[in-house]
Image: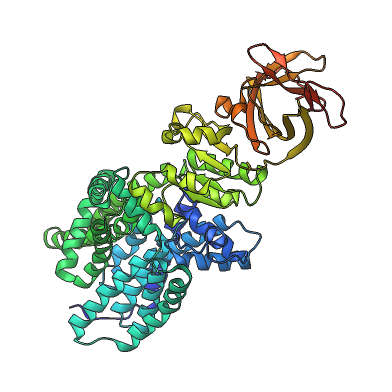
Amino acid sequence: MTTVKRTPLPAWLAAVVPAALAGAAVARWVQAPPYDDPYITFRYAANLRDGRGLVFNPGEPVLSTTTPLFALLLGALGALLPSVDLATLGYWLSLVALIAAGIFASAICWREGERAAALLAPFAVMLSPSLVQSVGQETSLLLATGFAGLSFWRQRRLVLAALALGALALTRPDGILLGAILLAAEAQQYRKLPVRAVSLFVLTVAPWYLYAWVTYGSPLPFSLAAKTAQAQTGWWMATGPALVGWLRWAAGLNPLAAVLGLVGVVYAAGRARWVLLLLAWPVAQLAGYTFLGVAFYHWYAAPLHAVLGLFAALGVGTIVRLVWRLARRWWQRSQPVAAMVYLLAALTLVVPSAQYTQSYGRDVPDAKMRQYEEIGSWLRERTDPHSLVGALEVGRLGYFSQRPMFDFVGLVKPAVVPHLREKDLVWSIKSYRPDYLVAIPSDRWLREDDWFRATYAPLRRFVDPRLHEGQPTTVFVRTVGDPPVQHPVRTLTHRFDDRIELVAYGLEVLATERDDTIVLALRWRALQPIDRDLTVSVHALDAMGRLVGQADGQPLAGQWPTSRWRPGETILDPREISMPSSAVVTHLSVGWYLLETMQRLPGVDASGRPAESALIDLGPGR
């Protein structure tokens, strides 16, 4: 066993420089959280900052974030810096934690006298591709607290180790595994338990666990049950099989780094076995996920990738030391040869990771994340603050829309999970009846359900040629059963044959280079029973009254004909009117007719004057 020595201050200073350089590289190339899930935690933090509690949907105590400490820190920062966007704060908090992880990784190597590895470790850890993919979420804080706990434990600073390991367990529940591993090592090596340190650890984590148990019913995030159910459907790959593919991907990115990592593991097994405790932590975590049958997400493997980076740095140090000894024996000029080998090995380890970081950062956030942000902002501007929104992924949509949300796969609504196991995704929509629903093209099961087609209609389509082969992501609106009000809404009273009343409409104009589209949401009220299926007439007119576009048809594309209307019922009828971009539309004419005879229904306007059509004034022209 290596003699324990306290790390002198210059060692920490030596660690800061490479960690700061690696952090600067990440900040330069990856300038935003890459994907959707961190925004679930950002929304928890936003609600905490705004006094609504640590919840996703205000008034619904469900623990879906896996990282309470990250959310609490971010909520506190948001309260101190209210003018700064929480997603931006989350990104920088993650980046600072990443630098801290690099510093402690360097300290672990330095403790073994591996100074060459210590200078390289921050780059090897911080630029590991899986960790780069996790910028903006809690993974870097997880590594920083874990590395700190191991480093302090090795220095016999058990109070600091207990605090760091307590923070680790609060960062993510599976972080408690490292504390258990070190406790077992402590008992095996010293034949006694550090009662003071264990007590401090318990005091650190107990307040949160008690609060979570009382508030949410369990200290474990509900997302664990949801992701287990995801794997049970077969639509998501479970951790075990997926991990095999991940290992192939990680080794294929830089095969030489994989070899260096194995060399580092062999070195640790012979000369620094305590460092292997660090490797046991992510291995135990992934083994637990495999045993539980949790669906795999790439950031689950980020701690393992980063730890293997540290071992690769130790592998470089081992090879350099071996070359130095051989060169000293054969050529009597060991230093230049060892320096050259070190430089080549360092470049082999770092350059591919740096190139990956740079190329990966070019597409962050990617087209999908940008579209979610666009849709979320549109919902915030156009819908009532209390409107319920459903979607497959609710991170960015929920954060930018600031609307109550649920997802089809049970991350924020526990009742969904049993039905997810049965592959019944429509249950959540039928049960919660969201006002709006965001459907990507792969959500084909929605359009195949008769009830959904009769209850929802497409309101707005968002198209990005880089996504879904150019197919649109569609926002559907609930059209029957007190449908929601879209903003800005204009009231317009016009009765047709004392059977139907047009009470309001929402309007939006989408302009492109080729053509313009007017999105019109008509709100009808049934006044009397209607025994015929009538057709809506929607005409776009220019200043001379000439027809330049139209969108005639039965309500909701025939899904909700007037013969099914009941008196007092409100129906929302979205329509899209496409026309050449050169057309100048000044009015929309809205009326009703019977298709078989083309006979129009008589109507009266708000002042009681006869008018077959209601006219919507668009001003000077659209």
Residue 112 is left or right of residue 439, and the answer is: left
Front residue of this view, candidates 237 and 180:
237
Q: Identify the image quadrant of residue 335.
A: bottom left
Up-down: is 248 above or below 159?
Answer: above
Which residue is drawn at the image coordinates 65% and 44% (left, top)?
383
Figure label count: 0
- The way the protein has been coloured in the rendering is rainbow
Up-down: is 594 above or below 154?
Answer: above
Front residue of this view, candidates 15 and 54:
54
Which residue is drawn at the image coordinates 48% and 44% (left, top)?
430
Quarter of the figure with the N terminus: bottom left
Up-down: is 605 above or below 121?
Answer: above
Q: Is residue 109 visible?
A: yes
Quarter of the figure with the C terminus: top right
Residue 118 is left or right of residue 485, and the answer is: left
Front residue of this view, candidates 62 and 77:
62
Up-down: is 158 above or below 427?
Answer: below
- Residue extending furthest top? 597
Q: Identify the image quadrant of residue 617.
A: top right
Percent across and percent down for residue 139 are 40, 60
Which residue is drawn at the image coordinates 33% and 83% (left, top)?
198
- Residue extending furthest left? 330
Percent across and percent down for residue 275 are 24, 69
Percent across and percent down for residue 173 are 36, 67
Q: Is residue 130 visible?
A: no
Front residue of this view, candidates 109 and 299:
299
Residue 409 is left or right of residue 242, and the answer is: right
Percent across and percent down for residue 228 are 32, 54
Q: Identify the image quadrant of residue 620.
A: top right
Residue 294 is left or right of residue 38, and the answer is: left
